Image (tube, helix red, strand yellow):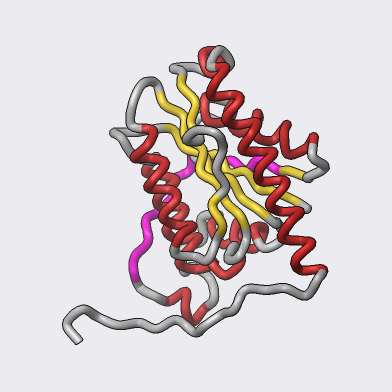
Amino acid sequence: MKVLLVNGSLHEKGCTYTALCEVEKALQANGIETEIYWIGQNQVSGCKGCWACKKLKKCVMDDGVNEFVEKAAEFDGYVFGSPVYYASASGALVSFMDRVFYSGGKNLAYKPAAAVVSCRRAGASTTFDVINKYFTINNMQIVGSNYWNEVHGNSAEEVLQDEEGLQTMRILGNNMAWLIKCIQMGKDAGLAPERERKIMTNFIR
């Protein structure tokens, strides 16, 4: 069983990474394999809305998104982390997730996921909401903790002083490990959710 943790910050080892590391430690303590994936500092293009991915089964732009989608299929759960920029997720992460879920959402569907947010002061709850919306429309189970999945600090060192935030991350990791194991037990027993073909309508029809 494996969990992929996505660092959506442009800073490789900053506040978001520090929060993800705390989740990772709890997952590993529960026997779950982990990998932290940094989206990097290269420009991530926004979705063109061309729908070519529906025919090609991959995004027409080649900037790492397709490679991530292929990698994601091998994992049993996901944690997407972001810093707060203007009370929202980082633009790079939003562009990244738009294209991941449009072109390869099926590789993540029916698996547990969680949002992790780092902020200096405010905007965490709105950023948390932005990221969670991807999961709720992709048949994924959202994993929570004993508080919103957020840490506070203006540097990695300050995040390490946020005892409540770090506890929230640890409990999140424990909860995700428990849910992944429960899902696996269900699969072993032959249980699976009922699935229906997507119905698409427009409000004017």
User: Is 48 contained in the magenta span?
Assistant: yes
- Looking at the rendering, the stretch of residues picked out in magenta corresponds to 35-49
**Residue 51 image position (x, y, % from top left):** 39, 75
| Total numbered labels placed on residues in the image | 0
* Quadrant where the C terminus is found in the figure: bottom left
* Front position in the image: 103 or 170: 170
**Residue 61 image position (x, y, % from top left):** 46, 63
Q: In the image, is residue 129 above or below residue 154?
A: below
The reply, left or right, for residue 154 in relation to residue 143 is left
Q: In the image, is residue 169 above or below residue 175?
A: above
Q: In the image, is residue 167 above or below residue 181?
A: above
Q: Quadrant of residue 13?
A: top right
Q: Residue at x 58, y 44 (%)?
A: 6
Q: In the image, is residue 173 above or below residue 192?
A: above
Q: Residue at x 51, y 55 (%)?
A: 63
Q: Quadrant of residue 133?
A: bottom left
* Front position in the image: 52 or 146: 146
Q: Is residue 10 visible?
A: no
* Front position in the image: 197 or 34: 197
Q: Residue at x 53, y 71 (%)?
A: 58
Residue positioned most to the bottom: 205
User: Is 145 contained in the magenta span?
Assistant: no
**Residue 96 image position (x, y, % from top left):** 46, 52
Q: Residue at x 51, y 29 (%)?
A: 11
Q: Main secondary structure of the magenta part?
A: loop
The reply, left or right, for residue 93 in relation to residue 5 is left
Q: Is residue 196 visible?
A: yes
* Front position in the image: 164 or 205: 164
